[in-house]
């Protein structure tokens, strides 16, 4: 696990009891479940990053998308 930052989260009594019960059932610490839930939420709702090169230039040619396979065939994944 990467470096963690301590924070405080206030939960309602019912949510806290349910979290503790689930943690017991799974044999995991409640804090681990909270970290997992936050990570999943952040992944689902976080900013999507785009490659910097996408749409960054214009070739002046209108057939690039039709020729994509031909143009990419010379590239190797090992480079």
Image: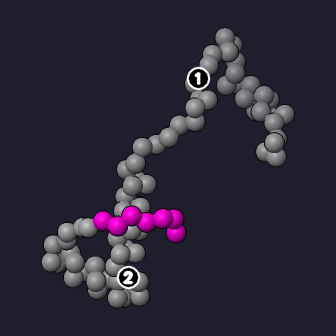
Is residue 35 located in the magenta-colored stretch of the structure?
Answer: no
Provide residue 3's location: percent of width, then percent of height: 48, 65
Please identify the residue farthest to the top as the structure is shown: 60
User: Which residue corresponds to mark 2?
Assistant: 29
Residue 56 badge = 1
Q: Which residues are magenta?
A: 1-7
Is residue 12 found left or right of 70 in the rendered image? left
| Main SS category, magenta section | loop
Provide residue 72's location: percent of width, then percent of height: 77, 33
Q: Earlier in the sequence, mark 2 or mark 1?
A: 2
Is residue 5 located in the magenta-colored stretch of the structure?
Answer: yes
Q: Pick whichever, 62 or 49, lies toward us.
A: 49
Colour theme? one colour
Viewer-nearest of discs 2 and 1: 2
Residue at point 34%, 88% (across, down):
24
Residue at point 50%, 40% (across, down):
49
| Above or below: residue 78 compared with residue 56 | below
Residue 76 badge = none
Q: Quadrant of the C terminus?
A: top right
Element at label 2: loop
Q: Pick whichever, 59 or 5, lies toward us.
A: 5
| Above or below: residue 78 compared with residue 75 | below
């Amino acid at each position: 696990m990467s470096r963690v930052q301590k924070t405080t989260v206030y939960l309602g009594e019912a949510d806290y009891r349910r979290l503790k019960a689930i943690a017991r059932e799974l044999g995991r610490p409640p804090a681990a479940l909270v970290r997992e839930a936050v990570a999943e939420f952040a992944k689902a709702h976080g900013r999507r990053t785009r490659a910097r090169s996408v749409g960054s230039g214009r070739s002046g040619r209108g057939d690039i998308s039709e020729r994509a396979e031909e143009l990419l065939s010379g590239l190797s994944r090992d480079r």
